[in-house]
Image (spheres, rainbow, N blue to C red):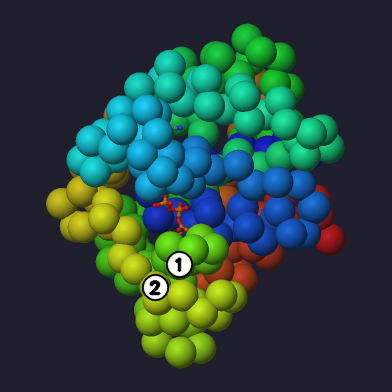
Amino acid sequence: MKLILIGPPGAGKGTQADVLSKKLGIPRISTGDILREAVKAGTPVGMKAKSFMDSGALVPDEIIIEIIIERLGARDCINGFILDGVPRTIAQAQALDGHDVAIDTALAIEVPDEDIIERLGGRRVCPDCGTTYHVKSNPPAKEGVCDACGAALIIRKDDDADVVRNRLQTYHRETAPLLEYYKAQGKLEISVSHSDVTGTAAEIFKILGIS
Ligand code: AP5
């Protein structure tokens, strides 16, 4: 299956992509994770991307397109993949189409803006293994400590309330037009996110016909 997850920041794309990746045995590919690794490692891509990410703007299309086309050429993508947060502009979607990346489904996760503020305000992430938690809806067993690897959890810099507002505006202006783009191709499915992770996963499984 070649699946795209589209949704505002904090919609649960990463959370659901992890669930689907384990269930289907195909990789989750997150441009956000790839860029954060590049920033951490101080690579030329990371240095270019950092200021855009810190302010809640999108990283320029040419950088993203190069990253994603290279990643999709890896062996683990042969049987399918889940794209988490990419494409995020019409230009990125057209680039995928231009490289014959035959997407099966573009799944939009809809969440009201006010829920996004609550979700990102309570998000905690593991800097080592990337596992994501929420202080209320999905807390770790021991406060502030990753269940999976024991590292101290952190708050993402771009989860600051002002940056979240910018990210939401960016989503509505630059990414939401993708819904029409994939609708016109007959590939759009919409999931209205439940207030818990399991309910959302159950709905997504139903939409995708996964038992
Ligand atoms: P990226 O890392 O992709 O951020 P994002 O799209 O803003 O998405 P998030 O990771 O914040 O949220 P999510 O939807 O994955 O939600 P999560 O599952 O964590 O991108 C970061 C930046 O990189 C961008 O701003 C941009 O600068 C750049 N970038 C990346 N890709 C790019 C591209 N293609 N083009 C240009 N620039 C790009 O869940 C959020 C919280 O809610 C968690 O705490 C979770 O536990 C909780 N939660 C999840 N589901 C539920 C639920 N159903 N009920 C209750 N709580 C829930």
Q: Which residue is mark 1?
A: 126
- At label 1, the amino acid type is Cys
Q: Position of residue 198 (x, y in %)?
A: 61, 71
Residue 29 visible: yes
Q: Which mark is residue 153?
A: 2
- Circle 1 Cα neighbour tier, 10 Å, few/some/many (<14 / 14–19 / ≥20): many
* Residue positioned 57% across, 51% down in the render: 191
Query: Can you give x and y, in whole percent of width and height, for residue 102 in the image?
Result: 73, 22
Along the line of sight, the residue nearer the viewer: 203 or 126: 126
Identify the disc placed on residue 204: none
- Residue 97 sits in quarter: top right
Occupied quadrant, residue 153: bottom left
**Tag 2's secondary structure?**
loop
Is residue 175 in view?
A: no
Q: Is residue 206 above or below residue 62?
A: below
Residue beneath the point at 64% across and 47% down: 28
Tell me whether the residue at label 2 lies in contact with that at label 1, contact meaning CB atoms closer than 8 angstroms: yes
In the rendered view, would you say 70 is above or below 197? above
Mark 2 belongs to which amino acid? Leu
Residue at horizontal 71 percent and vertical 25 percent from the top: 73
Closest to the observer, 171 or 57:
57
Please identify the quadrant where the N terminus is shown: top right
Residue visible at 71% across and 53% down in the picture: 21
Residue 172, given in percent of the width and then of the height, sits at 32, 35
In the image, residue 84 lies at what x, y percent? 55, 43
Q: Secondary structure at mark 1?
A: loop
Sequence-first disc among 2 and 1: 1
**Where is the C terminus found, in terms of image quarters?**
bottom right
Q: How many marks?
A: 2
